[in-house]
Amino acid sequence: MAQASAQRVEKNEAGEVAIQLLGVNKWYGEFHVLRDINLSVDRGERIVICGPSGSGKSTLIRCINRLEEHQSGQIIVDGNELTNDLKRIDEVRREVGMVFQHFNLFPHLTVLENCTLAPIWVRKMSKADAEAAAMKYLTRVKIPEQANKYPGQLSGGQQQRVAIARSLCMNPKIMLFDEPTSALDPEMIKEVLEVMVDLAQSGMTMICVTHEMGFARQVANRVIFMDQGQIIEQNSPVEFFNNPKSERTKLFLSQIL
Ligand code: ADP
Ligand code: MG
């Protein structure tokens, strides 16, 4: 009996924590950009990170898929600790999709080719299977009819939805978004947020850096405020917006709301 329950606990722990940062510090040269960051994200959580420009939000989420290296502390993603071990880094990147402010699509490839490139070359899928999966996700982000166009022929909102579909084609367990709507015209923000809401409702583990506070209220289970490389405050959206604790959070909210 004791053994069975020990196994259950172990399984539970391994199964429920998606991302863990323990005492993480990072410097760019002399500049201390992340200061003692502790953060644990359970599977299925939807986290919104906000904070002033330069507070380290992009650096933090880029460390989670090792686009940036941290210098001290631990980052563990789905049970893999990020170190210089390239095999682990590959494993983590396989499970973590990332969507950037500026889409980062390949301009010389069609929408469909953008979506099938990694599945074919990294996942070794057949072209037919990769294309079928790509069409499924392009339908999910509501642009299947754009499959044979080039990114430059699409609006910003459509390009960002392609970027999301492209990430989903790798079947990630975790999605990271870095200000995905901040380069978009207002009328296109909504169509991208709708796709992100749909993803959140499907149970995806998500960390979104965004200042779209309507989105945060609607889907986040936790809002984190960063300033000067630190997590200053975190709370449920209702508490965070209605009852911010720190003066820095209050000042930030007064500027953006
Ligand atoms: P945020 O996303 O919150 O605006 P960033 O993580 O992009 O903040 O940047 C945090 C700080 O680190 C800023 O002061 C920025 O200028 C600096 N920074 C970002 N990237 C680099 C880099 N590659 N080299 C040196 N400094 C950087
Ligand atoms: Mg940023």
Image (spheres, rainbow, N blue to C red):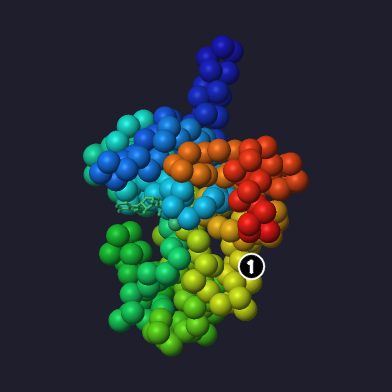
Name the residue beneath numbered marker 1. Answer: 194
**Would residue 218 be found to the left or right of residue 94 on screen?**
right
Tell me the amino acid under the disc marked 1: Glu
Please tell me in which quarter of the rendered image ligand 2 is found: bottom left
- The residue drawn where x is 57% and y is 45% is 225
Q: Quadrant of the N terminus?
A: top right
Q: In the orientation shown, which residue stands out farthest toward the top?
A: 2
Judging depth in this view, the residue of 119 and 129 nearest the camera is 119
Judging depth in this view, the residue of 222 and 54 nearest the camera is 54
Judging depth in this view, the residue of 172 and 253 nearest the camera is 253
Judging depth in this view, the residue of 240 and 78 nearest the camera is 240
- The residue drawn where x is 58% and y is 58% is 211
The reply to whether residue 171 is in sight is no
Q: Quadrant of the C terminus?
A: bottom right
**Would residue 202 be found to the left or right of residue 131 on screen?**
right
210 lies above or below 77? below
Q: Position of residue 18 (x, y in %)?
A: 49, 40
Describe the element under mark 1 as helix, strand or loop: helix
The reply to whether residue 130 is in sight is yes
223 lies above or below 151? above
